[in-house]
Amino acid sequence: LAHDFGQVFAGDPAEWAITIENLGSQTLTITDVEIQGEYYSVDFAGEFNLERYDTQDVTVTFAPLLMGEYEGQVIIRSNDEDLTIDLIGQGNRAIVSGEPDVLDFGETYVNSSIRRELEVHNDGNIDLMIEDVFTSDEQFRFELGALREFDWEFVEGTGYDMSLVIESADLFG
């Protein structure tokens, strides 16, 4: 048996409810539900009994924090035979990065400007959407060149160049 969580955005957990049912004629005692594998967890609260045709749900959660493919197992232990279910899931993430890390504008004189290039990349493994770019100081502004509007889609491994400009009206005057 196996369960594939598919692609899960890193930081957003995905849940899967396993319904355990007793189809036998004797009381089924679930003694433990173990989970193995990075970023997998189970909500097993402790041993329980199921009479014939009774059911109980146990939830397995996959919550990747990083990109990558992750395997695991859930093992249901009982007074009957143990059941092992293989788990697989893909952690996905869009990661924005820029080069260089620091833009040094040096001294800028009144009524002048200095331009520095900034290259923005998607280092993740899913598409990245950038809807807006802003600066924390009104003396800085972005020039987008040929990219006149936002809502950029960065496919995995792609990037755009843009210019960050400092314009000075009252610096070093």
Image (tube, grey):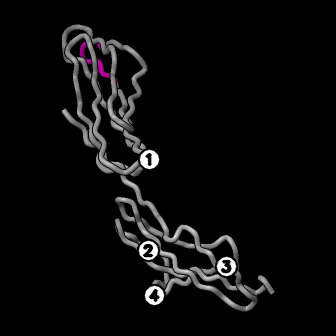
Q: Earlier in the sequence, mark 3 or mark 1?
A: 1
Q: What amino acid is found at the position of numbered circle 3 in the picture?
A: Gly
Q: Which residue is mark 3?
A: 106
How many residues crowd mark 4 within 10 Å: few (<14), some (14–19), many (20+)? few
Question: Which quadrant: the C terminus?
Answer: bottom right
Label of residue 152 in the image: 2
Q: Is 60 left, or right, of 108 in this rendering?
A: left
Q: Which residue is mark 1?
A: 12
The verdict on residue 13 being magenta is: no
In whole angstroms, how far apart are the C-alphas of marks 1 and 4?
Answer: 35 Å
Question: Which quadrant: the N terminus?
Answer: top left
x and y percent of residue 16 in the render?
33, 37
How many residues crowd mark 3 within 10 Å: few (<14), some (14–19), many (20+)? few
Q: Which residue is mark 4?
A: 146
SS state under label 1 = loop
Residue that appears at 29% across and 28% down? 74
Q: What amino acid is found at the position of numbered circle 1 in the picture?
A: Asp
Q: Earlier in the sequence, mark 2 or mark 3?
A: 3
User: Is 115 in front, or is 27?
Assistant: 115
In whole angstroms, how far apart are the C-alphas of marks 2 and 4?
Answer: 12 Å
Q: What amino acid is found at the position of numbered circle 2 in the picture?
A: Trp
Please give the range of residues in magenta.
Answer: 50-56
Q: Earlier in the sequence, mark 4 or mark 3?
A: 3
In whole angstroms, how far apart are the C-alphas of marks 2 and 3?
Answer: 30 Å
SS state under label 4 = loop
Label of residue 77 in the image: none
Q: Earlier in the sequence, mark 1 or mark 4?
A: 1
SS state under label 2 = strand
